[in-house]
Image (tube, rainbow, N blue to C red):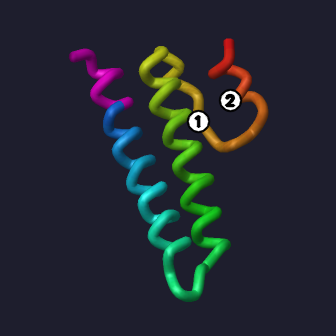
């Protein structure tokens, strides 16, 4: 397995944990919506990082801005 795929799997695992955190927050009696939204946003960035590493775009730092998203659809 290539190093890029290993790194991508690592980011996917972290993204899934962020989604689990968001889900747990949403099930709470008093839902902290800001925290749930934060974990969803973090998961989206980590999935994009995983995609970029698997497709050899490793030099781009991701945040949810139009330019990195554009790179993933090319």
Task: Using residue 73 as the reference point, say whether residue 66 is left or right of it.
Answer: right
| Picture quadrant where residue 67 is located | top right
Q: What is the x, y in percent for residue 43?
A: 52, 49
* Residue sitting farthest toward the right: 66
Q: Position of residue 8 (x, y in %)?
A: 38, 30
- Locate the C terminus by quadrant: top right
Q: Nearer the viewer, mark 2 or mark 1?
A: 2
Q: Residue under circle 1? A: 61
Q: Mark 2 points at which residue?
A: 68
Q: Position of residue 51 (x, y in %)?
A: 50, 26
What is the magenta segment's predominant secondary structure?
helix
* Secondary structure at numbered mark 1: loop
> What element does badge 2 sit on?
helix
Mark 2 and 1 residues: CB-CB less than 8 Å, in contact?
A: yes
Q: Which region of the structure is painted magenta?
A: 1-8
Vertical relation: 59 (above or below) 25: above
Location of residue 36 by image quarter? bottom right
User: Does residue 71 appear left or right of residue 40 in this picture?
Assistant: right
Looking at the picture, tell me which residue is in the foreground, 67 or 25. Answer: 25
What's the residue at 32%, 39% (across, down)? 10
Residue at 28 percent of width and 28 percent of height: 6
């Amino acid at each position: 397995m290539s190093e890029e795929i290993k790194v991508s799997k690592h980011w996917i695992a972290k993204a899934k944990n962020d989604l689990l955190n968001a889900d747990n927050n949403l099930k709470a009696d008093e839902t902290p919506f800001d925290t749930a939204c934060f974990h969803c946003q973090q998961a989206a960035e980590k999935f994009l990082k995983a995609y970029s590493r698997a497709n050899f775009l490793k030099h781009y730092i991701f945040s949810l801005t139009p330019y990195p998203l554009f790179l993933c659809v090319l």
